[in-house]
Amino acid sequence: MRWKREDAIFETVREAEVWADGFVNEMYGRVFDGYETPDYKIAYALSFFLAQNQDFIPH
């Protein structure tokens, strides 16, 4: 499994959503199998983007 880890922390949920919208394409393309972040805002945004696709099960 290829996991991506970043320590970026955004100030607002909107910033995290914009960033996650771009990153989620890499996950759809199977570049990465998972993502680890200390920022709950990024995790929140990614979970909603990925849950829209039935191939992904956010944990």
Image (spheres, grey):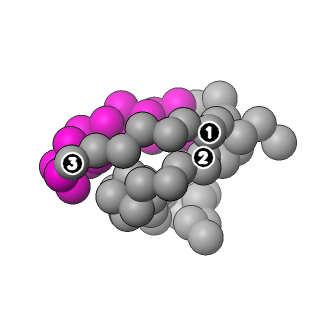
Which residue does the image show at 40% across and 62% down from the upper left? 40
Which residue does the image show at 21% across and 48% down from the upper left? 11
Task: Report which residue position mark 1 lands on.
Answer: 5
Is 30 placed left or right of 52 in the picture? Answer: right
Q: Tell me where residue 52 sits by quadrant.
A: bottom left
Quadrant containing the N terminus is top right
Task: Report which residue position mark 2 lands on.
Answer: 35
Instruction: Using the image, determine if residue 19 lies above or below residue 56.
Output: above
Q: Position of residue 2 (x, y in %)?
A: 77, 36
Instruction: Using the image, determine if residue 22 lies above or below residue 46.
Output: above
Residue sticking out furthest to the right: 1
For the residues carrying marks 3 and 1, which lies nearer the camera in this image?
3
Amino acid on which disc 3 is placed: Glu
Instruction: Using the image, determine if residue 30 lies above or below residue 9.
Output: above
Calculate the distance from the C-alpha at mark 2 to the C-alpha at mark 1: 6 Å
Q: Which residues are magenta?
A: 12-28
Task: Report which residue position mark 3 lands on.
Answer: 11
For the residues carrying marks 3 and 2, which lies nearer the camera in this image?
3
The local crowd at label 2, few if under 14, some if 14 to 19, many if 20 or more residues have their Cα within 10 Å, is some
Which residue does the image show at 31% across and 36% down from the upper left? 19
Q: Position of residue 36 (x, y in %)?
A: 60, 49
Q: Nearer the viewer, residue 31 or 41?
A: 41
| Earlier residue among tags 2 and 1 | 1
Q: Nearer the viewer, residue 51 or 32?
A: 32
Is 7 placed left or right of 36 in the picture? Answer: left
The local crowd at label 3, few if under 14, some if 14 to 19, many if 20 or more residues have their Cα within 10 Å, is few
Q: Position of residue 41 (x, y in %)?
A: 33, 58
| Earlier residue among tags 3 and 2 | 3
For the residues carrying marks 2 and 1, which lies nearer the camera in this image?
1
Calculate the distance from the C-alpha at mark 3 to the C-alpha at mark 1: 19 Å
